[in-house]
């Protein structure tokens, strides 16, 4: 079976990110073949804490130390996906539902 990594890029959008994550979780099963990640670009609105509290182990958070913008966040995601040897990668902005 193919392994898929789904990455959501975020900066100060905890409400958007929460809705996006919820939407993904309603459509797929999180298991060893499908993993969900939030790439957070140094948000200051409490996104990391909110996502950890609400979704627990269903979402892995990758924290960028500075805001690298959308392209930089997705670059972080792609580097991570290559390191994890995923067969497929999904990149989502945080406002996708």
Image (spheres, grey):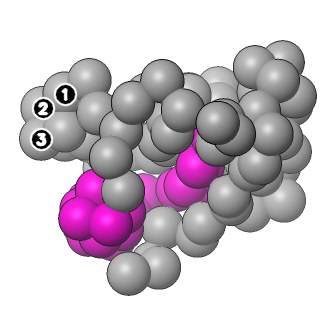
Checking the image for residue 20, the label placed there is: none
Q: Position of residue 76 (x, y in %)?
A: 79, 36
Q: Quadrant of residue 58?
A: top left
Q: Is residue 38 magenta?
A: no
Q: Taking 49 as reference, is 7 above or below it?
A: below
Give the residue at the far left of this rendering: 54
Q: Quadrant of residue 90?
A: bottom right
Q: Which residue is mark 2?
A: 53
Residue at disc 1, secondary structure: helix
The residue located at (77%, 33%) in the rendering is 86
Q: Position of residue 92 (x, y in %)?
A: 60, 66
Q: Taking 35 as reference, is 93 above or below it?
A: below
Q: Which residue is mark 3?
A: 54
Q: Magenta stretch: give its range.
A: 5-27
The residue located at (80%, 39%) in the rendering is 87
Q: Assess disc 1: are there few (<14), some (14-19) or many (≥20) residues with their C-alpha within 10 Å of its C-alpha.
A: few
Q: Which residue is mark 1?
A: 56
Residue at disc 3, secondary structure: helix
For the residues labelled 1 and 3, the Cα–Cα distance comes to 6 Å
- Mark in the foreground, 2 or 1: 1
Cβ–Cβ under 8 Å for marks 2 and 1: yes
Cβ–Cβ under 8 Å for marks 1 and 3: yes
Q: Is residue 76 visible?
A: no
Q: Is residue 18 magenta?
A: yes
Give the residue at the far front of this rendering: 1
């Amino acid at each position: 079976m193919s392994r898929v990594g789904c990455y959501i890029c975020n900066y100060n959008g905890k409400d958007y990110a929460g809705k996006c994550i919820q939407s993904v979780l309603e459509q797929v099963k999180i298991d060893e073949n499908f993993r969900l990640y939030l790439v957070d670009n140094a948000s200051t609105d409490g996104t990391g804490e909110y996502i950890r509290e609400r979704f627990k182990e269903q979402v892995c958070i990758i924290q960028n130390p500075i805001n690298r913008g959308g392209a930089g966040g997705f670059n972080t995601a792609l580097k991570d996906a290559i390191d994890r040897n995923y067969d497929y990668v999904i990149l989502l902005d945080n406002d996708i539902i």
